[in-house]
Image: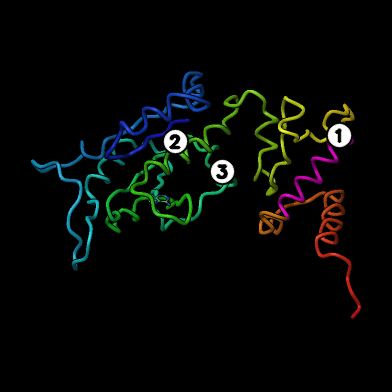
Amino acid sequence: MKIHILTLFPSFFEGPFSCGIVGRAREKGLVEIRTVNIRDFTSDPYRSVDDYPFGGGSGMVMKVEPIWRAVESVRDGKELVILLTPQGRTFTQKLARELSQCEHLVIICGRYKGVDERVTSFVDMELSIGDYVLSGGEPAAVVLVDAVVRLLPGAVGDKDSVDTDSFERNLLEAPLYTRPREFMGMKVPEILLSGNHEEIRKWRMKESLKRTLERRPDLLEHAELTEEEKKILEKLKEEKDGPHSCI
Ligand code: ADE
């Protein structure tokens, strides 16, 4: 996969993309990530990338021409052009999976108050990483690239650890423990030490459903549950609601 990040701050990405899973994926040649400085595509002596909004109002607006030229400079006919903006569609794990199938992502990081609306005429997708406003698209690009790159085959050593991630099936993951067996009086659940794989599988399934029901019941509306999971969920709901009274 090839990723181009169009930004006014290329140095922002030096740290995040040189370590961890993304850093290793680059070393292994699974992904090639390049930053493109939008300022290099200005045509005036001041190299200006922003201007006052027509019609007045506060803040500066990123100009359309430098962004257009920067995008044109990286097009290869296989690109998917993404604009990061709080006004975009919300980025999800499902979308991360879809994007991980793409050959070439071009990510535009907005700044200032926003970008000239005409930028949207040459992007394929507008994405937001959540309902809050960042000072620019750069932190959002780090989030997007991380979520996508770790899904590339070979990026994460143990494939299973990606497939059982929270959100992969619209279910939160069951609690995890490692040594020591006891910390400040808090013990690891006995079942996890039992060596009984079938019982551990059932326990994890129940805890995953319980956690999702408690913390993110909205996810359950989209989860495709097995018959076994459906039965457990019904029981959990009954326990949660308590005994039904006839009065
Ligand atoms: N730029 C500013 N805020 C953003 C957000 N929430 N998502 C994506 N890009 C942004």
Viewer-proximal residue among 1 and 221:
221
Instruction: Mark 2 and mark 3 in contact? Answer it, CB < 8 Å.
Output: no
- Give the residue at mark 2: 104
Instruction: Read off the magenta span.
Output: 198-213
Q: How far apart are marks 2 and 3 (CA)?
A: 12 Å
Report the residue that reaches farthest toward the front.
Answer: 184
> In this figure, what is the number of numbered marks?
3
Does residue 20 lie above or below 56 as drawn? above
- Going by the numbered disc 3, the residue's amino acid type is Glu
Residue 6, quarter of the rendered image = top left
Number of the front mark, 1 or 2: 1
For this view, does 50 lie left or right of residue 192?
left
Assess disc 3: are there few (<14), some (14-19) or many (≥20) residues with their C-alpha within 10 Å of its C-alpha: few
- Give the residue at mark 1: 191
- Going by the numbered disc 2, the residue's amino acid type is His
Residue drawn 70% across the image and 59% down it: 221
Number of the front mark, 1 or 3: 1
Residue drawn 30% across the image and 39% down it: 7
Q: Is mark 3 on a helix, strand or loop?
A: helix
Residue drawn 32% across the image and 48% down it: 110
Residue drawn 53% across the image and 38% down it: 147
